Amino acid sequence: MGAHHASHLHAHKKGDAHHGHYHQDSQSGILLTALLLTFLFAGVEVAAGFWAESLALISDAGHMVTDAASLGLALLAQIVAKRPPSPKHSFGFGRAESLAAFVNGLAMLLLVVWIGVEALTRFNDPHQVQGQAVTIVAALGLLINIVVAWVLSKDKKSVNTKAALVHVMGDLLGSVAALIAGLVIQYTGWMQIDPILSLFVCVLVLRSTIEVLKESYHFLMQGVPHHIDYVSVGADLRSVAGVLAVHDLHVWEMTPGEPALIGHVEIRDLQDWPETLRRIHLVLLEKHQIDHVTLQPEMPS
């Protein structure tokens, strides 16, 4: 069956949920702007970081390079997420954004580990760092990161954009740390400040990265939305007039921010099902903001 012949199977009619299973309003232009700004400066900072032998600057450069790749992946994911359901993917591609966010989080973890190990080795073997060069490049990097963070902050809905923003905030902190390191080395010659500030940035970025991984993992594993109490949903369903019992109940998110529910409901009389279903829809929407509901009525065993 082709996509044209299957399109009616994905249609939402009267009484169905109002949302589709794909993102129609993903702001890809936001990610594209952030990608271009990050990519243009990444090459400059990588070269300067290795030339100046500053771990703090290399940390920031590593973030910028990772961001260039992650923003590209995020942009691709948002484009894919806009695709409507197909015969082979009846739920659409809304999970592509969370998958990209999860991959980005893992990439950031690897980068943090590398920087941490390198910083620890530099305590015993300090490198001679070009303080003035670090100061200039870090100041430019800070400016670029502020602009990119401001651009990404415009998209407040996408978990994937939030993940990209975490990367950029890590870059911003890295630029601040590199700037401080450059100034301290330039005016005092104390090389130990370089690995110290690198470790400080690693700790801050690690905390934000773990949050992104937890959120994207929860969504990918079809976890119950954080704002919904699964037990309360079951209790509210059982309290509806005409409902005897509820089983095989599942609550998850079809796309980020759009909860869905399926389950089996035992009722007294199948003839009363239309009115009972209307009351169930009303309870789920008012108490739990769930409008995508699929329930199977059954008579008691």
Image (cartoon, grey):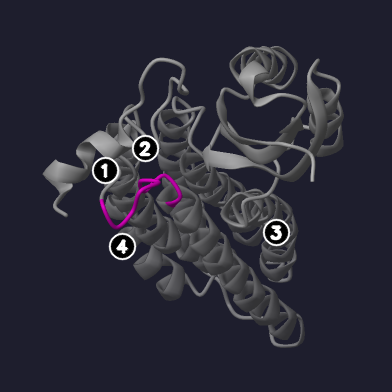
Image location (x, y in percent) of residue 258: 54, 31
Question: Circle 4 sits in a helix, a strand or a loop, which is it?
Answer: helix
Say left or right for 172 vs 65.
right
Query: How far, Cα to Cα, is label 4 from label 1?
Result: 33 Å
| Residue drawn at 66 percent across, 66 percent down | 194
Residue highlighted by disc 3: 206
Question: Circle 1 sits in a helix, a strand or a loop, which is it?
Answer: loop
Of the image marks 1 and 3, the number of the one nearer the N terminus: 1
Query: How far, Cα to Cα, is label 4 from label 2?
Result: 35 Å
Q: Nearer the observer, disc 4 or disc 2?
A: 2
| Residue drawn at 65 percent across, 26 percent down | 270
The amino acid type, in three-letter code, at marker 1 is Arg
The amino acid type, in three-letter code, at marker 2 is Tyr
Q: Nearer the observer, disc 3 or disc 2?
A: 2
- Packing grade of label 1 (10 A; few <14, some 14-19, many >=20) is some
Query: How far, Cα to Cα, is label 1 from label 3?
Result: 33 Å
Q: Nearer the observer, disc 1 or disc 3?
A: 1
Q: Which of 29 and 133 is in front in this view?
A: 29
| Residues marked 1 and 2 touching at CB (< 8 Å) | yes
Of the image marks 3 and 2, the number of the one nearer the N terminus: 2
Residue highlighted by disc 1: 83
Residue range in magenta is: 87-95
Question: Circle 2 sits in a helix, a strand or a loop, which is it?
Answer: loop
Prevailing SS of the magenta stretch? loop
Residue highlighted by disc 2: 22
Q: Is residue 167 above or below residue 284?
A: below
Q: Nearer the observer, disc 3 or disc 4?
A: 3
- Packing grade of label 3 (10 A; few <14, some 14-19, many >=20) is some
Q: Nearer the viewer, residue 246 or 113?
A: 246
The amino acid type, in three-letter code, at marker 4 is Gly
Residue highlighted by disc 4: 43
